[in-house]
Image (cartoon, rainbow, N blue to C red):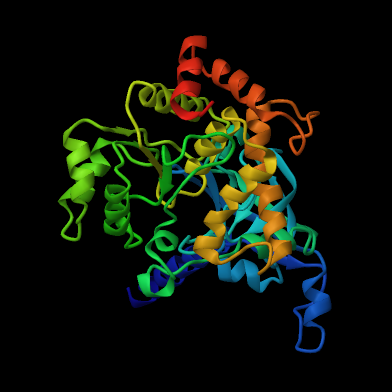
Amino acid sequence: MKTKRIIRNIFALWILASLVLLSACDKSKDSTTPSADNSQSASDSARTLQDCGVIHEQEFGGIYIKTTIDDFNALGYHYGDSVDVVFSNGYTLNDIPYYNGFYSQVGEPILIAYPGYDYIKAVISYGDDLWKVAELNDNDTATVSLAQAGKFSDIQAARDMSYEDERKAYDSDEEFTNFRSINAGNIKENMIYRSASPCDNQHNRASYVDKLMGDAGVNYIINLSDNEEKIAGYMAADDFNSPNFIQLYESGNISPLALNANYTSEEFREGVAKALSDMVEQDGPFLIHCTEGKDRTGFVCMLIEALCGASYDEIVADYMLSYDNYYHVNQTSDADKYEVIVREVLDPMIQAVVGDENVDIHTADLSGYAEKYLAGIGLSDDTIARLKVLFCSE
């Protein structure tokens, strides 16, 4: 009996070891493991992560590749490299960037090592669910190899930024909250403000925004980031202290739109149409915000600025003020980073409004393209005319 029990235990351990081996990725390299002397040259050579299992990440629509960020980077990968990802069903992503944040343009695939993720993830940046696009199933695997070391390192360096959530780190409440009126083109003075959220206090800014918008006499809010359920949660929190927001909310003077960040999607376009349709029925001043008042807010403000005759340079100056406020990035402090952000983040937004890649957005009269965009998302000629009367001075 004892011999049989030993045999059974040995067999069970063999099965367990086999399963572990089958579930692991084959981390192969075209060179030996780097020593201290040859680590740089080895890290620049192609490495392959072979036949890793995949998991459908359903919340944001991506593909977890079952190797940890630390293990993947230990192979010699660096943020800013480009990689090839080949799935066992034949679907392939060629020459895509490897970043630690969502730094690609909307709709472009990336391999991402986002802080807090269990594994590296292949995803379409603010786009469709890559798992469904690639038609994967739970039995598929992924192979990742280096395409070009450092190909996207300039974008990685420019976009890899963080900011402080303490008021004392900023020179003013306005800088801390990214609060300002937009005045590009012929927008009426103090008619439209933009800022971080006056209700979502995850970055400790809500009460400061609330006071500033109260001082500015804001009468109506376009909330691009939240729905009614989220707002109710903010208002029930112990640290909620935004009395002006409550007054506007209880008066029905807030449009909660809960937009995603994909400004090319139909959902986003419908949300923008609703925001502007709501505004034309109200009296200003208006506040437009999302979480930080930077990107979703930036798109809507850019569109209004273009409608009111703003030049490309005026739109850039307003948009990049958010990066100055949060990260102290401007043309004087870091001209290279400034230009990368304009090129990789703002220019595609403007191009999405123009809708024609052959148009030089730097010199074009953007007002006509803004009107055409608004018509394309369903606004009537009458509504567009009323928006211009509401927002734009003569």
From this view, report whether residue 164 is shown above or below residue 298: below
Quadrant assignment for the C terminus: top right
Where is residue 286 shown, x and y percent of the image? 37, 37
Where is residue 26 shown, x and y percent of the image? 66, 62
From this view, report whether residue 219 is shown above or below residue 376: below
- Left or right position of 127 against 150: left
Question: Is any atom of residue 314 visible in this view?
Answer: yes
Quadrant of residue 308 within the rendered picture? top right
- Left or right position of 287 against 116: left
Quadrant of residue 34 within the rendered picture? bottom right
Residue displayed at 32% across by 63% down: 204
Where is residue 201 shown, x and y percent of the image? 29, 57
Using the image as rendered, state which of residue 134 and residue 104 is in the foreground. Answer: 104
Residue displayed at 36% across by 33% down: 257
Quadrant of residue 240 within the rendered picture? bottom left
Residue at the limit of the structure toward the bottom, as seen here: 37
Using the image as rendered, state which of residue 139 and residue 290 is in the foreground. Answer: 290
Question: Is any atom of residue 19 visible in this view?
Answer: no
